[in-house]
């Protein structure tokens, strides 16, 4: 006697379809969560007044690059991790050599390389010498003898009589600076992670009904 057992519907086909639906749901959920987190971080950065350029440093990569997988993942990161991290943690910043931190005043202008100008660069650019003034209360100063141009920048005076020459504060000197915490990236990351299971379930059900 020969017996033959058949399953209707096909169990193997059902399992394969279930796995395919799961792979699609997980991949779609991770892509959506990653996109949502990238958008949230960028909005948080620009909303904190840190500019769209820094906001655009937030990038997203989804894995696998093509196709679907039950092990799908999304990676969100910044191309400027040091700057982003500083605004996210609000660290206490001290001078590397243990002396002063030089904070430029508006009269100092900006660095030709972009960002904050240093005392050495300022002296080379203007040809003026900085003079140290110690103050018992408040920040000490680096000042220069010069004049302010129409843009409010300190420059060398061309007057031979000394007319218009003034002592201009160029840098404030402080022993340390507490950077204000302006971001809370972990908050948005936690929200994105917490939302993943619901996205997977919803996508899995929709995929089976489609």
Image (tube, rainbow, N blue to C red):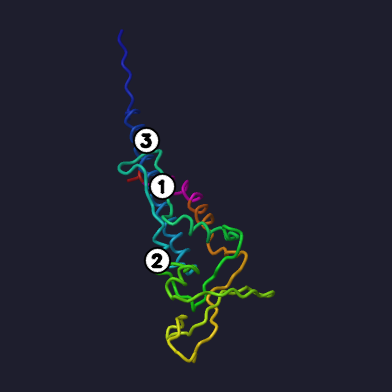
Chief SS of the magenta region:
helix
Q: Nearer the viewer, residue 100 or 90?
A: 100
Judging by the rendered image, the residue that carries numbered circle 3 is 19
Q: Is residue 208 visible?
A: no
The residue most toward the top is: 1
Real-space CA distance between mark 2 and mark 1, rounded to the nearest whole angstrom: 35 Å
Whether 26 is drawn above or below 190: the answer is above
Q: Is residue 16 visible?
A: yes
Q: The N terminus is located in which quarter?
A: top left
Real-space CA distance between mark 3 and mark 2, rounded to the nearest whole angstrom: 54 Å
Choose mark 3 or mark 1, whichever is in front.
1
Q: Earlier in the sequence, mark 3 or mark 2?
A: 3
Magenta range: 193-206
Q: Residue at x 44, y 57 (%)?
A: 80
Residue 82 is left or right of residue 1, and the answer is right
Q: Position of residue 183 (x, y in %)?
A: 53, 62
Give residue 113's mark: 2
The residue most toward the front is: 160
Q: Earlier in the sequence, mark 2 or mark 1?
A: 1
Judging by the rendered image, the residue that carries numbered circle 1 is 74
Q: Is residue 205 magenta?
A: yes
Crowding at dot 1, Cα within 10 Å, few <14 / some 14-19 / many 20+, comes out as some
């Amino acid at each position: 006697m020969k017996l033959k057992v058949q399953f209707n519907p096909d169990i193997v086909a059902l399992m394969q379809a279930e796995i395919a639906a799961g792979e699609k749901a997980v991949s779609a959920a991770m892509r959506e969560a990653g996109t949502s987190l990238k958008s949230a971080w960028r909005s948080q950065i620009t909303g904190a007044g840190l500019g769209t350029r820094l906001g655009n440093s937030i990038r997203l990569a989804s894995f696998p690059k093509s196709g679907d997988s039950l092990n799908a993942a999304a990676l969100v990161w910044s191309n400027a991790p040091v700057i982003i991290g500083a605004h996210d943690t609000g660290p206490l910043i001290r001078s590397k050599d243990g002396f002063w931190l030089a904070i430029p005043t508006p009269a100092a202008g900006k660095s030709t390389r972009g960002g904050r100008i240093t005392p050495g660069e300022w002296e080379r650019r203007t040809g003026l010498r900085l003079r140290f003034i110690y103050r018992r209360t408040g920040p000490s100063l680096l000042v220069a003898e010069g004049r302010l141009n129409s843009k409010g920048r300190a420059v060398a005076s061309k007057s031979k009589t000394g007319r218009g020459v003034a002592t201009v504060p160029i840098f404030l000197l402080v022993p340390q600076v507490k950077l204000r915490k302006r971001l809370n990236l972990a908050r948005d990351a936690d929200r994105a992670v917490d939302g993943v299971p619901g996205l997977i379930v919803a996508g899995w059900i929709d995929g089976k009904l489609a």
